[in-house]
Amino acid sequence: QVQLVESGGGLVQPGGSLRLSCAASASTFAFYGMAWYRQAPGKQRELVAAITSGGSTNYADSVKGRFTISRDNAKNTVTLQMNSLKSEDTAVYYCGGRRYFGTGYSYWGQGTQVTVSS
C-alpha cells in the first residue's frame, strides 16, 4: 500500500506562485508514474500534470507554461510549481500515483486546497 501526503496549498493572489509537494511512502517510488489532479467545486476531477518514472511530463493545456511538475526519487517526492496563478486555478489539488504505465492512478493523497483570490 502506497501512502501519499500533499502539502503546500493555501491562499494566493492572482499572479502569485505556490509550490505543492507530495511525499510518497513507497520504497519503489522511482518506478511509479505520478500526477497532480484538481477538482473545483461542481466540476469533475481533471488532470493537471503528470510525470512518468522516466521523467517524461505532460500538462493540461490550461496550465502549460505556468506549471512545472518534477520529481526527486531520492526523497520520494513529486512537486508542482505553480506560477502566474489565476482565479480559475482554485481547486483541491490531489497527488496520484500508479505502478504501471497505462493503468489508472490507484493511489491518492487527501488533497490540498489552493485558493487564488484577491
Image (cartoon, rainbow, N blue to C red):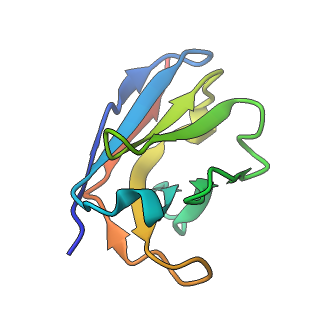
Provide residue 73's location: percent of width, then percent of height: 41, 45
Judge from the rendering whether residue 5 lies leftward or rightward of residue 82; answer left or right: left
Judge from the rendering whether residue 49 lies leftward or rightward of residue 94; answer left or right: right
State the residue at coordinates (54%, 69%).
Answer: 44
Provide residue 13's location: percent of width, then percent of height: 50, 16
Residue nearest the viewer, comparing 67 with 62: 67
State the residue at coordinates (40%, 55%).
Answer: 95
Q: Is residue 34 above or below residue 1?
A: above
Provide residue 41's location: percent of width, then percent of height: 45, 57
Q: Residue furthest bottom?
A: 103
State the residue at coordinates (34%, 33%).
Answer: 9
Residue nearest the viewer, comparing 64 with 69: 69
Judge from the rendering whether residue 87 lies leftward or rightward of residue 79; answer left or right: right
Which quarter of the figure is the N terminus placed in? bottom left
State the residue at coordinates (61%, 23%).
Answer: 83
Q: Is residue 71 above or below residue 44?
A: above
Provide residue 108's location: percent of width, then percent of height: 33, 66
Residue nearest the viewer, comparing 74 with 77: 74
Judge from the rendering whether residue 65 lies leftward or rightward of residue 52; answer left or right: right
Residue nearest the viewer, comparing 70 with 96: 70
Q: Is residue 20 above or below residue 91?
A: above
Q: Is residue 20 above or below residue 23?
A: above
Tag count in the figure? 0
